[in-house]
Image: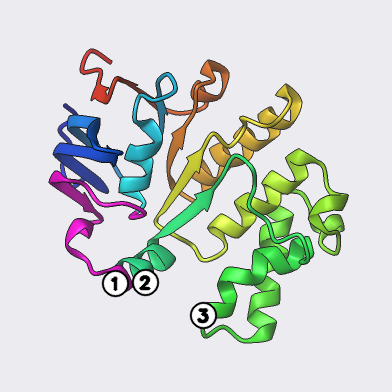
Amino acid sequence: MESISNPIVHIKHLTKSYRRGGQIVSVLTDISLDIPSGEFIALMGPSGSGKTTLLNLIAGIDKPDSGTLKVGGIDIATLSEGELADWRAANIGFIFQFYNLMPVLTAFENIELPLLLTQLSHKKRQEHVELALSMVGLSERMEHYPSELSGGEQQRVAIARAFITDPVILVADEPTGDLDRVSAGEILAILKRLNSEMEKTIIMVTHDPYAAKTAHLIRHLEKGELDVTD
């Protein structure tokens, strides 16, 4: 178990199971892990090891069966669905393997989408989006639709959308899993920059050792248990 003073994520004796038909299937068993603010951690493990489930719990998409789960000092397992939705919007940026972009919106409009829920003026939203596009190297592609972008470019749009609201944590589920090695390297370089320059805490699920090397800390899951020998 990691023991860190005032971690951004504090997990202790966490368990999670799902019902499949008439059976209860255990997914995570007695997980304890502390993640310091500003860390870049990779969660590795084979398919079915529970790494995406753990990521979803940290991001407030799901709730644990038992144990302690605090993010930023808040016990998110105790929040109502409405409170949890507000908390996610303010604190978590999501990066998915298959980008999850709106096909009818341009790159600019996809990135702007989360800002429409804020009180920012149109001018301020435009400034924020243009800065985000610049950071991911897509200023000249802002008017292009997802179908007009490569996979790597679509993922860069998705990353810009994830950090546009300045969340506390970025969670990335296999962010390079659908990309070639060159595009994957570009995505990992952006994540590394967000971590080092913007001090974003990044929690990345990956099965790729090449991607995991970008992180400062690697933790392995095996059959729902955290490898304490890491």
**Labelled disc at residue 86:** 2
Q: Name the residue under label 3.
A: 118
Q: Bounds of the magenta span?
A: 60-82
Q: Which of marks 1 and 3 is nearer the N terminus?
A: 1
Q: Which residue lies furthest to the top in this view?
A: 229
**Is residue 31 positioned above or below 86 on the image?**
above
Q: CB under 8 Å between callouts 3 and 2?
A: no
Q: Which of the two discs, 3 and 2, labels the residue nearer the N terminus?
A: 2
Determine the secondary structure under disc 1: helix
Mark 2 surroundings within 10 Å by alpha-carbon count, few (fewer than 14), some (14 through 19), many (20 or more): few
Query: On the rendered structure, is 78 left or right of 55?
Result: left
Q: Where is residue 225 in the image (x, y as percent from the top left)?
A: 23, 23
Tag on residue 83?
1
What is the x, y in percent for residue 187? Answer: 65, 37
Quarter that holds the C terminus: top left
What residue sits 69% from the left and 53% below the top?
157
Q: In the rendered image of this protein, does residue 92 appear above or below residue 51?
A: below
Looking at the image, which is closer to me, 17 or 162? 17
Q: What residue type is labelled 3?
A: Thr
Q: Are marks 1 and 2 in contact (CB under 8 Å)?
A: yes
